[in-house]
Amino acid sequence: MAERIGIYPGTFDPATNGHLDIIGRAAGVVDRLVVGVAVNAGKGPLFPLEERVEIVREEVRMLNNNAASRIEVKPFQTLLMHFAKSNGANVIIRGLRAVSDFEYEFQMAAMNRRLDVSVDTVFLMAAESQQFISSRFVKEIARLGGDISPFVSPRVAQHVRRAIARGGDAAKPEDDGIGTTIPAPAGRKPI
């Protein structure tokens, strides 16, 4: 049987407990998992790409289920399906928090399938305790001086506090590699 290689893409700005829940569970579905940290200047990242990659790597190392050895964290700024192909992936992992996520994710999965029929999309429902968490809400709460400790690890909370103290947004806007940014559809709250 061929090795099942999965890609779990996201901006991870910052990595939340919801992201880590999906990463840990996705590692149980595939033989090897690549967490793809996407360049997405359109979202106004709090952290530069390199820092987001390092934060996710740090969080993966702390997973309790011995899966860390089968998880790799990589940045990417290409079309997701090109990134999947370059990593030999045959599965895209997407997390769903609510019905509102499904329509957008369904459209993306259908488009990705049209681009490459050899790569399937697998949806994982966020754990009940994580369904309301989004990176956008975590950043907003932190910027307004609220407690983000229920939503992120202590390590991530410390990174967020430092980023807010240094000015609140990534020091340099990121180039998406093609000169344009396509924003996520209104109402979409990536997990």
Image (spheres, helix red, strand yellow):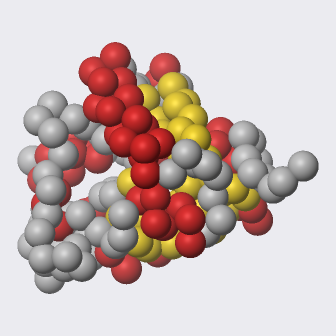
82 or 102, nearer to the observer: 82
Instruction: Count the marks.
Output: 0
Residue 133 in the image, given as x and y percentages of width and height: 34, 34
Q: Quadrant of the C terminus?
A: top left
Residue 106 in the image, given as x and y percentages of width and height: 38, 29
Residue 161 in the image, given as x and y percentages of width and height: 25, 63
Residue at figure coordinates x 9%, y 47% from the top left: 144
Residue at figure coordinates x 56%, y 55% from the top left: 7
102 or 26, nearer to the observer: 102
The reply to whether residue 143 is visible in this rendering is yes
The furthest residue to the right: 1
Residue at figure coordinates x 43%, y 51% from the top left: 115
85 or 186, nearer to the observer: 85
In the figure, is residue 189 to the left or right of 131? left
The reply to whether residue 55 is visible in this rendering is no
Residue 42 in the image, given as x and y percentages of width and height: 13, 60
The image shows residue 37, relative to residue 142, as above or below, that is: below
